[in-house]
Amino acid sequence: MNKIILLTRPEHDTATSYISYYAGLTIKQARDHSIACKDFHGKEVIVQEVHKFIIKQQPKLLFLNGHGSPEEIEGNKGDILFSIKDKQLLKDKIIYARSCNLGAKFGKEIVDNGSFIGYKVPFVFYTDTIQGNPAKDKVANAIIEPTNEIINSLLKGNTAVVAHERSKASMRKNMNRLLSEGAPMILIEALWNNHEGQVIYGDEKITF
Amino acid sequence: MTYSKDIKQLVKARISVMPSNLKLSVGNHGTFSKEELIDCVEKENMVGKEVIRMQMDFIKALTSGRLMDTLNQ
């Protein structure tokens, strides 16, 4: 297993454009820690290419972004990137899947001598149509940015469970801030959904 | 699971006060404006059911005190 982080971040609609932007921010963090990073971005998220890279390079940390269901996660435009059948390929990995519902089944079933962090519910966020741009959208930032803490924390050498808990602490901080600012309650609801739906399976003490 | 008329009314009322510039992103189902969300709740389609579940979970956490206990951690 090699100290490499592999990112998949398709970008073909509003949801994937936003989470891809936030995933991209962790690349700089990886470089700051002199950690090798393989970024499959947009149309480059080709199933065969991603699988080939995993077999050859054996990255220890997988950061998967994209649409999901309880049993599979998508790559570019609906291609199935990983399903429960890929258990052997995903053995020994630390996986963070910023995707809907994968924590309901996929995460439990594929984790084998590694760790999985994901969501047992839809991962939701609000966007501000006035900003209309992930880099400028403070509404989306308040909801998505805390989840980057999982990867940033793992890159710093923390255990999977510490990364998971730090991310949840960051969500709570944002919920408290939004409450004190009198922000619309629906934003706090979205953060609460993600906070309560974020799960960890497997070896909680594993480090990257 | 189907929801009662009262629950749907409550959820729609809460959505109706949401600022018009906000849209909710629900995975591969898409991104939804206030009016679209109200329509989804009325029709009780997949997105509507998720929105109702999300709001009911939040209201339960708020009224039981679990939300404030969690935020005070």
Image (cartoon, coloured by chain):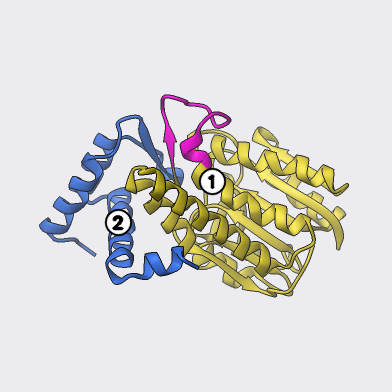
Chain colours: A yellow, B blue
Residue A174, numbered circle:
none
Which quarter of the picture shows residue A21?
Answer: top right
The amino acid marked with disc number 2 is: Gln
Q: Nearer the viewer, residue A140 or A61?
A: A140
Q: Position of residue A101 (x, y in %)?
A: 48, 59
Q: Are marks 2 and 1 on the same chain?
A: no
Q: Position of residue B62 (x, y in %)?
A: 31, 63
Which quarter of the picture shows residue A20?
Answer: top right
**Residue occupying the point 68% across, 73% down:** A204
Residue B55, numbered circle:
2
Give the magenta-colored segment's residue range. Answer: A126-141
**Does the magenta-highlighted stretch encompass residue A158?**
no
The chain letter for the residue carrying disc 2 is B
Mark 1 secondary-structure assignment? helix
Answer few, some or many: residues within 10 Å of disc 2's Cα (few below 14, many 20 plus, some between 14 and 19).
many
Answer few, some or many: residues within 10 Å of disc 1's Cα (few below 14, many 20 plus, some between 14 and 19).
many
Q: Is residue A177 left or right of residue A157?
A: left
User: Which quarter of the image is occupied by the N terminus of chain A?
Assistant: bottom right
Q: CA distance from mark 2 to mark 1?
A: 19 Å
The amino acid marked with disc number 1 is: Ile
**Does the magenta-highlighted stretch encompass residue A132?**
yes
Mark 2 secondary-structure assignment? helix
Q: Position of residue B55 (x, y in %)?
A: 30, 56
The residue that mark 1 highlights is A144
